[in-house]
Image (cartoon, rainbow, N blue to C red):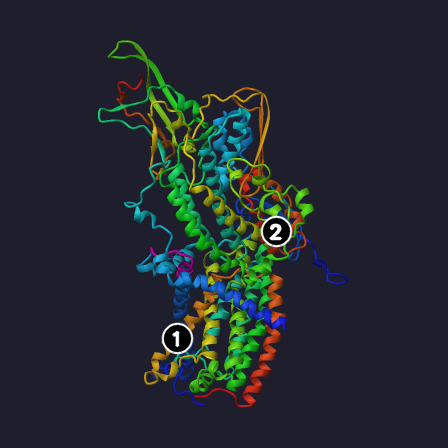
Amino acid sequence: MNISLNITTTITEFLSGFMSEGAANIGTMVVIALIYLAIFAVAGLYLVLLERKVAAWFQLRLGPNRVGPWGLLQTMADALKLVSKELTGTVKADKFLYNLAPYFVIVSSLMALAVFPFTKEFQAFDINIGLFFLIAISSIGVIGILLGGWASNNKFALIGAMRSGVQTISYELSVGLSLITMVLLTGTLQLSEIIEVQKNGWLIVQGHIPAIIAFMIYMIAGTAETNRAPFDMVEAESELGAGFHTEYSGMKFAYFFLAEFINMFIIAAVATTVFFGGWLSPFGITESIPWLGVFWFIGKTFMLVFLMMWFRWTFPRLRVDQLLTLEWKYLLPLNLLNIILMALIVWLNLTIQF
Amino acid sequence: MDTTIKNSNLKSEEYFINMGPQHPATHGVLRLLLTIDGEIIKKVEPDLGYIHRSIEKMCERDSYQQIVHLTDRMDYLSSHINNEAVCLTVENALQLEIPDRVKVIRTIIGELTRIASHCLWWGVMGMDVGALTTYFYGFRDREMINDIFEETCGARLTMNYNIPGGLMFDIHPNFVKRTKEFIAHFKTKLPEYDTLLTGNVIFQKRMKGVGILTKEDAISFGASGPVGRGSGYSCDVRKYHTYSAYDKVTFNEALKTDGDSFARYQVRIQEMWESMSIIEQLIDNIPEGDVQVATNAVIKLPKGEFYQKVETARGELGVYINSTGTKNPYRVKFRSPGFSNLSLLNHIAVGGKIGDLVASMATLDLVIPDIDR
Amino acid sequence: MSYFGDIVKGIKTLLTGMSVTGKYFITSRKGAITQQYPDNRETLKMFERFRGEVVMPHDENNEHRCTGCQKCEIACPNGTIEIIWDRQIDPESGKKKKMIDQHIYHLGMCTMCGLCIEACPTDAIVWAQNFENSVYDRSSLTKVLNQPGSKLKAGVEE
């Protein structure tokens, strides 16, 4: 299926007007990379602000309200501060790995952003294994965390990194399986086609019971993937101080921090795409104005991000062995059962189509 | 709980880690020397002395009126009860007859202190197990009590409202009204504590069966207060060595027999209900009368040894004064509840995970200046 | 089936927990319990018994009530109060009399215990409700409570 023209082709056509085809291709990549970087550096910062505001409202506080109107520039100021800070490090750290770790984390989370269809037109990279690509990329981030924890020569960081390894490897499974449950319904891994399928009703409606179970499992596992409370074993403040990024400061710390929030956005965006129809408006109310899709996409994503924040500011943290119990004794068996259920439903044609 | 990997070719090495003196879970400047095998705690050695101010030695320098304000700085969360302990010791030594009004006011403020302390404990305990929002809910209710204190005593934390022979001055006219308002408010908020945290499945998993302390161990470690009562050791000083106006009120000693962290948690929640009931019994009929008995400007205790214990929010606080008949004590010793409760940390934490250590330490409700003095 | 029962029960407890925070989130507009401190300086009023710092009130004739008896100095556990006094000739009666030269108060050492104010027989020193006590230089924490040129109010000593 040809997904009309997206921004990649638009920019390539524009650039090839005054340069050779090869140069135009490279130029396109650079331009798109820059656009995405700029958008998500800012989006990440505002996610941090949103988190702080939401936390404040849960906790009977006001939240940041000093820098700019309603504190809107607070995280910008924080970022400026972090940029200007000294990059400290431990003496016996493995310097190369120590410096490499933040880039692993931030690059993996930025790469994952490339495949999302924000609207029909706004998608940088529409590959036919989109979902698979996402799962693969999102598990690279843990290498950065492991490296950071190992290389900074700090026992707290090491414990945090090891916990992260255990956690991400386990929950990767649930994320993958719950998405595969939905792939049974769509029959494709390509994100743009997954959304096309949902024109007959969002997948969470089409797949009804197993889809809802898959969504719940996905949200739990996704929260664990991003190392957020109640699964923040990695940086469990009251246990490990700051966890794997104990020894990082300045911009290197900011990379870890930003990556956490972009990962949160990614998890929510995947859920939006796979379960809630991506940029499709509910009942097609704004179908005639395609660019509104981006608002639907962002809106749905933020609802899910808010849900994750709600989790974070309500629940206590699990212990590390309970974390594994939850995955291997509850989520995994449920997930496997759920796949069978979904397969039956697809086979017997019990899906709800509009 | 099987803690070792048996019959395995995997070789693991124990390692040593410093938790504190600057660590979010140690609530101050407690330093724990942990020996860990992976995630499993092998040994916990508390290292004290980071906030030692030699309060006991300073007491030997001061007059009996001056000692009182030093005890504010020991267990700062139950400062009024500490003050009361010293005052009771001195009053018993002098065999002063204390007016009923003083006794009742001391009891009410003491119980308010206990609620305030438990509110703070609930907040930080939630933070220790990772639920950050509890902190603000606990502090919201604690602020109301602090306002009551500020209006009556002039200070929020280090109140120094007691003097040997009574109270420094009478309660503020608004005291009764505000206290009633608080009780009405807190009765709607305390059930919320339960819905937010107590019932939560994650919280229960973190708490139940963790940090188990048997009744025998509790007694032999000298545990007192909610820690002892969580293990089924009935040790409420208010019941067994009654002082102030506790003989005039009826209340139940919160007792749980499980001995785990969750039992200690439940005991404290139960104690908040009991404290509210005690205040309700007393607040409407505070007897009229003086708030001070005249004492000499320079108090001289008779020669001898005097001991008085009270129940602070953390457990049994004992005050021992050895007097040679001069205006200063020869020796003052405080038996602080936190010290004994800390001593059993190694016992209950070994074999658990790092997360268990933090959770059981939170239920011990340690206040480090109380331990170090 | 306790396996599935546990899951359902667990999810239910989690949802009740979320309902508590959710309720506060919805009512957060009016529910903030924090104060915006430097902004509410005008309206922020301390209780009248609040122990901010020790001051010595003077009346319009620059007269205070301190007789220099030094009871506060003795009562203070920390050596916060120092009274410098000497015997001067009282201009009215012509007799030699104990008069304060300087009533020195070291705010940096004060623990706000209130023993000095309780000890004062003439109510010469009282609590002020001022709570903004931070200064840039430690030496400015040492204050002389009696104003220069002030003298004892007549009739206090009787």
Q: Residue at x 54, y 85 (%)?
A: A184
Label 2 is placed on what type of residue? Lys
Tag 1 residue: A31
Q: Is residue A54 magenta?
A: yes
SS at mark 2?
A: loop
* Distance (Cα) linking label 1 and label 2: 66 Å
Which segment is the magenta one? A53-66
Residue A163 in sight here: yes
The residue lying furthest to the top in this view is C95
Side of B179 where C9 appears, left or right: right
C60 up-or-down from A352: above or below = above
Tag 2 residue: B256
The residue lying furthest to the right in this view is B7
Residue B267 or residue A176, whichever sits in front: B267
Residue A169 in sight here: no
The residue lying furthest to the left in this view is C60
Which chain is mark 2 on?
Answer: B
Residue B52 horizontal/vertical position (percent): 55, 36
B8 up-or-down from B153: above or below = below
Residue C22 or residue A259, whichever sits in front: C22
Front position among marks 1 and 2: 2
Residue A81 or residue C77, whichever sits in front: C77
Side of B22 where B294 appears, left or right: left
Residue A108 horizontal/vertical position (percent): 50, 70
Q: Is residue A100 magenta?
A: no
